Image: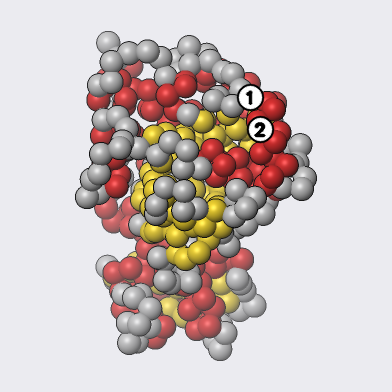
Amino acid sequence: MNNKMNHPLITVDGRTLMDRPLEPPNFVVDTLISQGLHILAGSPKVGKSWLALWLAVTVAKGEPVWNMTTKQGTTLYLCLEDSVLRIQNRLFEITEDAPDSVHFCTECALIGQGLGEQVDAFVAAHPDTVLVIIDTLQMVRPIHDATYANDYRDLSVLKRLADKHGIAILLIHHLRKEKAEDVFHRISGTTAISGAVDSSFTLVEEKRGSGRARLTCVGRDIEYRELELRRSEENVWQLVSDSRTQPELLEGQIVVLLSAFMSSRTTFIGTPTELSEKIDPDRIEGVTPKKISRLILQSIEALRKNGIQATVRRSNGKRVIELRRADSVDLEGAGEIVPIDPVEALCGDLRAVFRCGE
């Protein structure tokens, strides 16, 4: 009998879940590539491999990717359709100096036939690894029929590998030639490929040979966006425009709004509605009472770094938000409110939430 059948389900009730601080996803490229499994698909010769190489080098250096900050660390580029000589020539085009923290490999095992163990060994030798790029996905897949079950099984193996090590794995893949109203429907293979990954990116050239392309992005942890890119003479894809008009996501904006609000006071205790009306009375920023608790719970650490301690409590059956500036000492009325959860309890999954409630 399956061992999972011998254990009860681990659950968390809705009230507890809505009141617990949760860790936001960790990003390798801020707001674009989080830890997990991702796919970048494009037509042949569109410049996917040039983009992959530039990403591997840029992240290893800790330099910004199109004005987005990166988490510096070791990167591994499995360039399975290239030779070492070709990679060397391309490196000389895109950078003046490649760091020793970016690694290249032109041969590896297949999924389910040793690839996982090879990545395990690499991460063990380089514990600061943050990004692994596989170029291309087809080169590491065993030979079998292209069915939904096979597609999902292969990508699930890579998804578990990324989650196991807390890294981002980016798969380079192809688009079908057939046009589609939704560009993501052009990703080669069954819909299981898009369903199994955390994010999908498509690189579509404006016109063959134009050097201009659109990178369309969608995912579980990122907002939908379109980036217009231009390929430079050095074969680096440069940002022309970004469809994300807001300079910051609400998760970042809440820190800005609360920092300004708390600059003239030491404490605040009130309901989500009361706080929302004070920091965004005209709803210009979109910080509604329903959103404000979630935004605060997902920004606990960012607020702490900005000198604000935030706690969500319940008082007389109502949710109450308590804010305290770092230099404040006493909390007026704090004794009347029973905390649901300490600020320090940052739980990222149901097991952690379950333990926090014990």
Q: How is the image coloured?
A: secondary structure
Please state which amino acid type lies under the numbered disc 1.
Ser
Residue 195 position, x and y percent, is: 30, 37
In the drawing, does residue 144 fall left or right of residue 49? left
Q: Which residue is mark 2?
A: 87
Could you give the CA–CA distance between mark 1 and mark 2, rounded to whole angstroms? 6 Å
User: In which quarter of the view is residue 318 placed?
Assistant: bottom left
Q: Which residue is mark 1?
A: 83
Find the residue positioned furthest to the front: 209
The numbered disc on residue 342 is: none
**Residue 116 in sight in this render:** yes
The quarter of the image holding the C terminus is top left
Residues at discs 1 and 2 in contact (Cβ within 8 Å): yes
The quarter of the image holding the N terminus is top left
Nearer to us in this view, 217 or 279: 217
Residue 158 position, x and y percent, is: 44, 28
